[in-house]
Amino acid sequence: MKFLPLVLANLGRKKIRTALTLGSFAVALFLFGLLVAIRGAFNQGIDVAGKDRLMIINRTSLIQPLPLPYRDRILRIPGVTAVTFASWFGGVYQDEKNFFPQFAVDSETYRNVYPEFAIPADQWAAFLEDRMGCVAGASLVQRFGWKIGDRIPIRSPFFGGVWEFNLRAIYKGQRAQDDLTQFWFQRKYFEEKGPPYMKGLVGWYVLRISNPDDAVRVTKAIDQEFANSAYETRTQTEAAMAASFVKQMGNIEFLILCIGSVVFFTLLLVTGNTMAIAVRERTAELAVLKAVGYSDRFVLGIVLAESLTLSVVGGALGLGLAKAFTAGGDPTGGMLPVFYLPPASLAAGFALALAVGVASGVIPAFSAMRLRVVDALRRV
């Protein structure tokens, strides 16, 4: 009698219970994968933030603008190597449900500050030559079926009318968690077609510094430069700015994670209890194995092998489904632009499945190992 066939034979005796146990493991690990992806989506801005980037917004609020002449004054501050700016557009494409971020950017400096976004040179050149040109992320292009050269109309509830753009470039990220749902267009077009009160004003500045260790010094220098002016500033690292946005949505994230965690651990407890019952029901059979000459260690190994087989197969199935689901990108239509399950989380989930398999099988396994044949057969 071989070891593996015996394990499979024992698991196949009650197929329905084995299938339900595998299903419980699969559901639990699938939920684990979704929770990791959701948490990563809420925190993706922090994870991908550049260590050498700072963001400058109006001290009053992000929605308040800053003067364009601030750019030259910021560049003169020691430690600053590059400055760009952008403005929020907030338009609607076809339907209000089609949400994605749209920015009017400084086309001459934007790529210098965000080098992680890869754009073919010919496409970027076409974008610069077309004042109505735009750049869209690869995920956004895939979502709406756009292609280079398409005319994209976007209705603006804030700046009036329908704005038309020509898709000239598609950007991709160099990291799996990069946001590929943004839409950029030229600041020059925004000033020409936009309202007069926005001329000479920008939404925020983003700058790069030569040494990330100088972030505190540069931050203080910038805010002191514009202190007591009509447009006072608040400067933060890009990671700190992203964290402040996450904090605003903290209750939603906490609620999702709490509910998901409760369901997840409940499923694991139920699964572990089911596996422990399955072992206890076979006390007499384990005694027979000992009676015909199998050692205590063999019985211990059999019980643990069955438990681990269920956890490995069920866990792999659940994690595989989670990976397949997250591979499709954002399922919320723009609310979670980066929906990604990293390999490290897959490994952690698999390790968790193994740990649960061991924990649920170790007590019944040791009980079976210490079982006296006479006492066990007496229970029959």
Image (cartoon, rainbow, N blue to C red):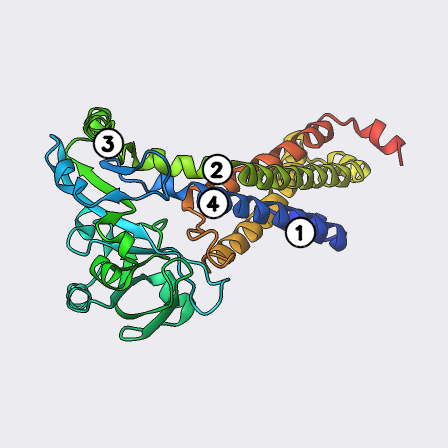
Secondary structure found at label 2: helix
Q: How crowded is mark 4: few (under 14 residues within 10 Å), some or many (20 or more)?
A: many
Measured in 3D between alpha carbons, the distance from the residue under mark 1 to the one under mark 2, in whole angstroms, is 36 Å
Measured in 3D between alpha carbons, the distance from the residue under mark 4 to the one under mark 3, in whole angstroms, is 51 Å
Q: What residue type is labelled 3?
A: Ser
**Horizontal side of residue 351 vs 13, given as left or right:** left
Q: Which amino acid does label 1 sit on?
A: Gly
Check the image and report above or below for 33 versus 159: above
Q: Can residue 184 be seen by looking at this rendering?
A: yes
Q: Earlier in the sequence, mark 1 or mark 4?
A: 1
Give the residue drawn at x 45%, y 58%. Answer: 329
In the picture of the structure, the residue carrying the numbered disc 4 is 346
Give the residue drawn at x 34%, y 50%. Answer: 178
Q: What residue type is labelled 4?
A: Leu
Q: Can residue 1 be seen by looking at this rendering?
A: no
**Horizontal side of residue 222 vs 377, given as left or right:** left
Q: Which of marks 2 and 3 is in front?
A: 3
Measured in 3D between alpha carbons, the distance from the residue under mark 2 to the one under mark 3, in whole angstroms, is 28 Å
In the picture of the structure, the residue carrying the numbered disc 1 is 23
Secondary structure found at label 3: loop
Q: Nearer the viewer, mark 1 or mark 2?
A: 2
Tell me where residue 263 appears, x and y as whole percent. 66, 41
In the picture of the structure, the residue carrying the numbered disc 3 is 229
Q: Looking at the image, which is closer to me, 135 or 117?
A: 135
Tell me where residue 330 appears, x and y as whole percent. 47, 56
Residue 233 position by quadrant: top left
How many labels were placed on the picture?
4
**Horizontal side of residue 181 vs 251, given as left or right:** left
- Asked whether the residues under the numbered discs 1 and 4 touch, taking CB atoms below 8 Å apart as contact, a structural biologist would say no
